């Protein structure tokens, strides 16, 4: 508001407050042409010099009432002592204009300082809303000129909406039981900021956001929802019992809504509440993997066999299980991974069980499944354990190479294809003993979900392994590379063999499993 308009508004306020006191001689406020009013004051005591210039002849005067001077006039700025107090006394003895009121005698004295204070308060009240209205109109004009809302206000409103939603649906710590086919994915773990390599977690996080379980900003920064995977499966590796822990909003029909935004080859099969500090990776006691392979991989190298005709005999199966049992216990597996030396303590791993099940036929090809349970596994460890057993059964290496591989000597260990590797199950035995029966939490066991897990494997995991093996012949092509390995070579002579083996394994498009190398 301009200074002129502010002054006009203030004058209007003054006219409201003291208008009845400031009417010219012979007028009645609010009545045009009214007759004279006896004793009317010619000028407003607040009007200053302008009021004095137009004042009528000196009005009748009066002295202060007998009960003493008015407090508003008898006191001044120096009430506690000083010149102001003396000023007040002088003013109390001055003659003041007499104003006739139609009220009781106590109201006969007009108090200018009180009216002045009231006028200033009203002036501030008039000016403040006007400024607010002006600022509001300016904001509207800016919106109309720019064609869009103020971004800052919009962001604040969005944040308030998110807070309201969070209050309605507080986040809780849960675990999700996942199953997925890893073909076409570059592993489980999400690579934030990289869209070149698609991962399982990319699809999972997208579904969590779209279903309303987590805010969008939590999808960009997974630490905000305390996300943790139990096992980081690598490129091409599938899972039937992966576990992830995170904080979500427990919305209605949560599993159905999440699955509605996932592709059919990724499913959430179960959900359970856990303790607030639960971490799926750190609380995991053991992991069980399976490896599905065609049985012709165990045929001796001197036998010319046809893939669809070969059947695994009982004697060969017993030999396979005997060799797999050698891995049980704690051993130094530095030769079964990369970038770990023989003196690295982290290369020692504990294997609980490892065996090969009975063979079965699918689409005219006989397959078998090897299962291994261990506390944790290093990158490529399982694939190399199976690859070395195949090399022994086929006659490329002696049985003694297994124990030799646990020593400090560098041994050339072949790495089997990653196609058939599946994360079957993760174990939380210590957690279940402590919290599983506390009355607040459920044990992390999935007996009720076993049927759904079996159905998913039959529909998505096994068909993918079988069809890919038939089309790409990953196992058959890898078997042809075993002859280039020198299982008795020194560390120097082995480097060239490793290079050739690496080139052949790169064609597989799979990197195996990696549980604890985050």
Image (tube, helix red, strand yellow):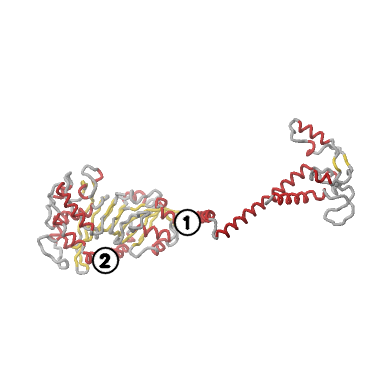
**On screen, residue 49 above or below 210:** above
Q: Is residue 199 visible?
A: no
Please tell me which of labels 2 and 1 falls first in the chain.
1
User: Residue 10: where, in percent of width, then height?
Assistant: 73, 49
Image location (x, y in percent) of residue 248: 42, 55
Along the line of sight, which residue is nearer the eye, 365 or 469?
469
Secondary structure of residue under mark 1:
loop
How packed is label 1: few (under 14 Cα within 10 Å), some, or many (20 or more)?
some
Which residue, given by chain and number where applicable, does mark 2 sit on? 463
Q: Residue at x 24, y 60 (%)?
A: 419
**Disc 1 designates what residue?**
169
Check residue 178 in the rendering and tell me which mark sits there, or answer none. Answer: none
Viewer can see residue 294: yes
Q: Secondary structure at mark 2?
A: helix
Q: Answer yes or no: do the residues labelled 2 and 1 have beta carbons within 8 Å?
A: no
The single residue placed furthest to the top in the displayed view is 82
């Amino acid at each position: 508001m301009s200074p002129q308009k502010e002054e006009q508004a203030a004058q209007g306020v003054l006219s409201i407050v003291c208008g009845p006191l400031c009417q010219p001689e012979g007028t009645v406020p609010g009545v045009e042409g009214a007759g004279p009013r006896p004793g009317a004051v010619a000028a407003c005591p607040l009007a200053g010099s302008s009021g004095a210039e137009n004042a009528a002849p000196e009005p009748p005067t009066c002295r202060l009432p007998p009960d003493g001077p008015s407090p508003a006039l008898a006191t001044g700025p120096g009430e506690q002592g000083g010149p102001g107090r003396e000023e007040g006394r002088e003013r109390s003895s001055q003659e003041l204009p007499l104003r006739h009121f139609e009220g009781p005698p106590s109201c006969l004295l007009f108090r200018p300082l009180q009216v002045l204070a009231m006028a200033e308060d009203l002036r501030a009240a008039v000016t403040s809303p006007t400024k607010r209205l002006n600022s509001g109109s300016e904001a509207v004009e800016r919106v109309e000129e720019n064609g869009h809302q103020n971004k800052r206000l919009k962001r604040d409103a969005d944040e308030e909406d998110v807070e309201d939603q969070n209050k309605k649906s507080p986040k809780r710590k849960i675990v999700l039981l996942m199953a997925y086919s890893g073909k076409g994915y570059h592993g489980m773990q999400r690579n934030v900021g990289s869209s070149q390599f698609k991962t399982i977690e990319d699809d999972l996080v997208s579904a969590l956001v779209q279903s309303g379980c987590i805010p969008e900003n939590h999808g960009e920064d997974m630490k905000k929802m305390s996300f943790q995977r139990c096992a980081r499966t690598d490129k091409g590796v599938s899972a039937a019992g992966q576990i992830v822990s995170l904080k979500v909003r427990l919305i209605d029909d949560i599993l159905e809504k999440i699955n509605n935004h996932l592709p059919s080859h990724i499913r959430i099969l179960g959900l359970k509440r856990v303790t607030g500090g639960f971490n799926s990776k750190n609380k995991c006691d053991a992991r069980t993997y399976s490896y599905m392979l065609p049985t012709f991989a165990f045929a001796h190298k001197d036998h010319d066999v046809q893939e669809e005709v070969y059947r695994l005999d009982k004697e060969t199966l017993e030999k396979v299980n005997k060799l797999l049992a050698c891995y049980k216990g704690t051993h130094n597996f530095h030769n079964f991974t990369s970038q770990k030396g023989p003196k690295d303590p982290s290369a020692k791993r504990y294997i609980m069980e490892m065996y090969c099940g009975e063979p079965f036929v699918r689409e005219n090809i006989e397959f078998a499944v090897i299962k291994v349970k261990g506390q944790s596994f290093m990158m490529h460890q399982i694939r190399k354990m199976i690859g070395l057993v195949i090399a022994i059964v086929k006659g490329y290496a002696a049985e003694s190479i297994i124990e030799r591989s646990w020593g400090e000597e560098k041994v050339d260990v072949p790495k089997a294809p990653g196609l058939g590797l599946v994360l079957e199950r993760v174990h939380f035995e210590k957690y279940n003993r402590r919290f599983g029966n506390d009355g607040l939490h459920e044990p992390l066991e999935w007996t009720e979900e076993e049927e759904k897990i079996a159905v998913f494997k039959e529909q998505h995991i096994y068909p993918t392994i079988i069809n890919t093996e038939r089309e790409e012949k990953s196992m058959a092509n890898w078997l042809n590379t075993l002859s280039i390995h020198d299982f008795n070579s020194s560390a120097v002579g082995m480097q060239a063999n490793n290079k050739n083996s690496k080139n052949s394994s790169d064609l597989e498009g799979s990197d195996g499993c990696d549980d604890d190398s985050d």
